[in-house]
Image (cartoon, coloured by chain):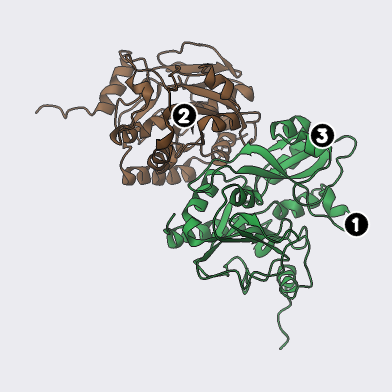
Chain colours: A green, B brown
Amino acid sequence: MSPKPKTPAESLRLACRANTHTTSTSLLAPTIQANLLVLPTRYAPSFRALCARNPVSCPLLWTTPPGTATTPLAAGADLRTDLPKYNIYVDGVLQSPRGVLDIREEWSGDHVGFLIGCSYSFETALERAGLPPKHTLCVPARTVPMFRTTVPLCPAGVFTGGVMVVSMRAYPAGRVEEVRDITRRFGRQHGEPVAWGWEGAERLGIAEKVRGGKVDFGEWVEVGEGEVPVFWGCGVTPQVAVMESRIEGVVLSHFPGCMFVSDVPAEDEAGLESVIKILDVAEEVCGGGED
Amino acid sequence: MSPKPKTPAESLRLACRANTHTTSTSLLAPTIQANLLVLPTRYAPSFRALCARNPVSCPLLWTTPPGTATTPLAAGADLRTDLPKYNIYVDGVLQSPRGVLDIREEWSGDHVGFLIGCSYSFETALERAGLPPKHTLCVPARTVPMFRTTVPLCPAGVFTGGVMVVSMRAYPAGRVEEVRDITRRFGRQHGEPVAWGWEGAERLGIAEKVRGGKVDFGEWVEVGEGEVPVFWGCGVTPQVAVMESRIEGVVLSHFPGCMFVSDVPAEDEAGLESVIKILDVAEEVCGGGED
């Protein structure tokens, strides 16, 4: 009996585990992708509150029990090895600007993992609508451009001083409403854009950076003639919150653009619902902890 | 048999209905108070999404079926008469700068009412902790100062271009953490502050207005020597969203500071839970409508 063929998502996770895939996961599987943040257990209640208060940039999908690096969102996955690259923070300071390949040694019994929705999850839908994000068309494909805005997060417990991070995709001005409509239903994947156009960039406090092509994370992709920048909430936001709040101890995360690829179909509303139901059970099971 | 004595909340609602109470509801009952917004039915889905995306300034407590002005949060209450004063907007423009006493004629069969949490709900808790808000100590008591910030809301459907409105209470700098702790558990009443101190006022883009005592809503109350301003999300935010989005048709709301006073005890966690459960049922029952 031959083994069941692997899905694109599973193949990708295994390639990450073997360190043969170490770059962006954009458009590599038609499933929900997720940001990862791993915190000392004592910060878990504050972080859950931060997500509840800022659901557009921090839409929480899953919380692991302490010391556990698995999730029902992907059978057999190991969150310590199955992402392309990771960041390590100590006392709020990034240790490895170019990322590391796994976090097996750093993820202790006192660490809790959080999976947060990612805008890569709606890129297949944009592509199918004839609106492929330009960073996916570059050869080689680039990581989506990301900017640190001046829009303050609503603080929660130890998490103070954070700001919203956004991803940017350029589209013809006349198609922005279509782009809004397509991404709106991906509510746990940042949903519809938070701003668009140059006026929108001004409101986010990043017009100068965008005009100059100066990304804070990811890689720059040109805004062409007749196009405007469109901005979505971004799951790198919690990493900035960790840095701004100078969280003590070891914090782990994905490397921007190098996401966790789940088995939950991104296009399937029932799939999204199952995530939400799993999450609701998780809320009951994983509550508690100390701040 | 003598009739059951009325609670402070019920007495207050009846005084509003009789137009004998027409001012601020701050500290007048130890129950949850709520902001009111009444929209043409076609805008309901966008508004629910706006609340879901901006839960700190717009924590949704209850949605009425179309044309219905009652709520299980207060037995026998009529949302068209039982608030001290109301605002009326036509095509996004405020019609009555000083407010009107009821909205019986304006609330049509095609209107849906939304109740949104209010920071007045945690003022009794602050008072009991020896931290009474200064606006409640003024003689006569004033409405809490409110400011329109430059922090953009996350847009949703027809609601674009909105900004967060905040309420302000001054406290000694050394007691801000205590104030944060007390209000944090009132999650559906804006929860912990969104900013504090003069640096916080800068982040909200309102330092100049606060230093000059120039409120956008409510009445000014001095920030004293050794005190700092503390800011919370405010349920006047949806009214600014209605104006900025130039929503067509007739929109109704409470007058800032003149809230709906419910029967749900503000201090009772079980009471809050019951609100949330009622809301969850309401989500299932009241979904739908057109945008």
In the image, what residue occupies the spot 72% across and 56% down?
A256
Residue A74, position in %: x, y?
Answer: 62, 68
Name the quarter where the N terminus of chain A is drawn: bottom right
Q: Nearer the viewer, mark 2 or mark 3?
A: 2
Q: Secondary structure at mark 3?
A: helix
Indicate the chain on which mark 3 is placed: A
Mark 1 vs mark 2, CA separation in Å: 53 Å
Q: Against B65, is B136 above or below?
A: above
| Near-viewer residue (B166 or A39) | A39
Which of the labelled discs sits on residue A174, or is there none? 3
Kind of residue indicated by mark 3: Gly
Indicate the chain on which mark 1 is placed: A
Kind of residue indicated by mark 2: Val
Q: Is residue A80 shown left or right of residue A47? A: right
Q: Which residue is mark 1?
A: A139
Residue B117, position in %: x, y?
Answer: 43, 34
Residue A9 visible, this angle? yes
Residues tagged 1 and 2 counted as in contact (Cβ below 8 A): no
